[in-house]
Image (cartoon, helix red, strand yellow):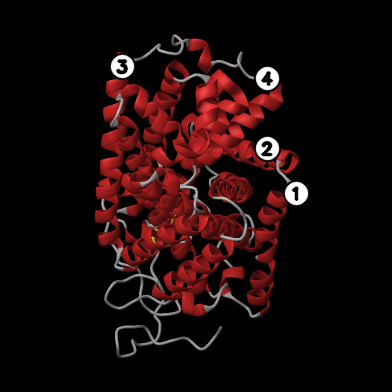
Amino acid sequence: MSNSGGRGLQAGALGMTDTVVMAVAGSAPAYSLAATTAVLVGAVGLAAPAALLYCAIPMLGIALAFSRLGRLDANAGAGYSWVGRTLHPFLGFLSGWALVVSATLFMVAGSLPAGSLTLALFDPGLADDTALSTLVGAGWFLLMLGVVLGGARLTARAQLLMSGVELAILVLFAVLALGHVGQARSFDWSWFGLGHFDGVSGFASGTLVAAFSYWGWDVTSNLSEETRNSRRTAGPAGLIGVGVVFVLFEVFTVLVNTLLTPERIAAHGADVPAALGEVIWPGWGGKLLTVAVMLSTIATLETTLIQVTRSLFAMGRDRTMPAALGLVHRSWNTPWVAIAVVGAVALVLFVASTALGTVGEILADAIRAIGLQIAVYYGLVGVAVVVAYRRTLLSSPGAFLLNGLWPLLGSAFMFWVFAESLAELSGAAVGIGLGGLAAGLVPMLWYWRRGSEYYRPARLDASRTVETDYVPAAGPALAPGGFEGLPTDF
């Protein structure tokens, strides 16, 4: 694999605490609760805690896959590199492209509620103004774009602040809620069983929504080249992140079941956290949880920007996309061209989105399309780890479970989610999801024909691979003025 610019990202910029915070922020607990609670309860009713539980089990299998593969190949492209080196370069590119498409869609889907939530704090009547929400959301997006451009350390500090306040608010309300439990109905352990699902179709509907809730923790793998001792840090941080958001999701879903009636949940939609806050702390509760959701949304915009720009950086470095995307700023050690390109594309989509409908409609359509891409690249990584460790799977029961069976079951679950999505989604959502994936065939075939070394990979085999961080090949000298010299092969 080549390096287009001769400089890498800032090695050792992040520690264990930073990466755990990034993993939690990537899943955006408060935002996910706002975006999916009403949909989840509408789909499975009192079985919402069970849907989150049974989705967490295979999701942990995928997190194990990311952790184990990260020990063999610490690469900003993560699944793009791993799948390409184990299954096939075409599938590897598809995995990376799926992340790029889903992250780009989410930046539009996430920026709009960030804008509407900000407006709601001042005047609830302005929150449904799509044009104004788009303008404010674009402002938050540009601010996060600047933070990400400023480097990994600045990004981590901003994330610690935003996610720290968000988590503090969520924990505060979890404690305050102890005095209100049972207001709508009494707690029942059966909510974690299978009895409340309406058959297999009901189970499928619930876990489809839950899968979107967990998405994002894998940002730690895209930051592996900027993490200290990344082979031992990035993967475990992702696992811890999944565990933290699982607990938060379960606590607040149980609180929704005990404190809110189905009618109130349906009436509030994406404002369920605010309604919950008003029950727990009348007067201030709704506003505080709205602040938590807003901060969570902005924080996950930042982690999504990291994922898509690091993925594009890895593609540019390997020359499977324009090589300029692999350039690194000399002072900030960030992929400045990739960041600028993503910013420009997202701003165009922001403007276009104002003609597509209300904030709620845009968010719903984007989430449905994103689910297809999530299932593809998570599922491929789950298979990749089994192939990479295939020669050592029978060395111990632990190796068989952690490197084989559990990730493989997680992968099977993701592909099942993909199939169920195709059957349940609208034609428009399926068209956006599959059309976005199909668009990746153009650059894939173009750069394959141009002879990118990515398409002649060194196979990733745990029985032969030395666990090491990515070391870029030597590249051209720096140009004056703070930026790498522009490559000529596009």
Q: Judge by depth and name the residue closer to the eye, 246 or 268.
A: 268
Residue 393 percent location from the top left of the image: 54, 38
Vertical order, 61 against 180 (above or below) = below
Residue 321 percent location from the top left of the image: 56, 73
Local crowd size for mark 1, using a 10 Å CA cut-off: few (<14), some (14–19), many (≥20):
few
Residue 146 percent location from the top left of the image: 33, 67
Local crowd size for mark 4, using a 10 Å CA cut-off: few (<14), some (14–19), many (≥20):
some
Name the disc covering residue 427, or none: 1
SS at circle 3:
helix
Q: Earlier in the sequence, mark 4 or mark 1?
A: 4
Disc 3 from disc 4: Cα separation:
30 Å
Q: Earlier in the sequence, mark 2 or mark 3?
A: 3
Disc 4 from disc 2: Cα separation:
18 Å
Identify which residue is drawn at 70% across, 37% down.
420
Residue of label 2:
416
- Name the kind of residue labelled 2 in the image: Trp
Q: Earlier in the sequence, mark 4 or mark 2?
A: 4
Disc 3 from disc 1: Cα separation:
44 Å
SS at circle 1:
helix
Q: Earlier in the sequence, mark 3 or mark 1?
A: 3
Vertical order, 158 against 451 (above or below) = above
Identify which residue is drawn at 45% across, 13% down.
184
Name the disc covering residue 178, or none: 3
Mark whose residue sits in front, 4 or 2: 4
Disc 2 from disc 3: Cα separation:
37 Å
- Residue 223 seen: yes
Local crowd size for mark 2, using a 10 Å CA cut-off: few (<14), some (14–19), many (≥20):
some
Residue 8 percent location from the top left of the image: 36, 71
Residue of label 4:
198
- Name the kind of residue labelled 1 in the image: Gly
- Name the kind of residue labelled 3 in the image: Leu
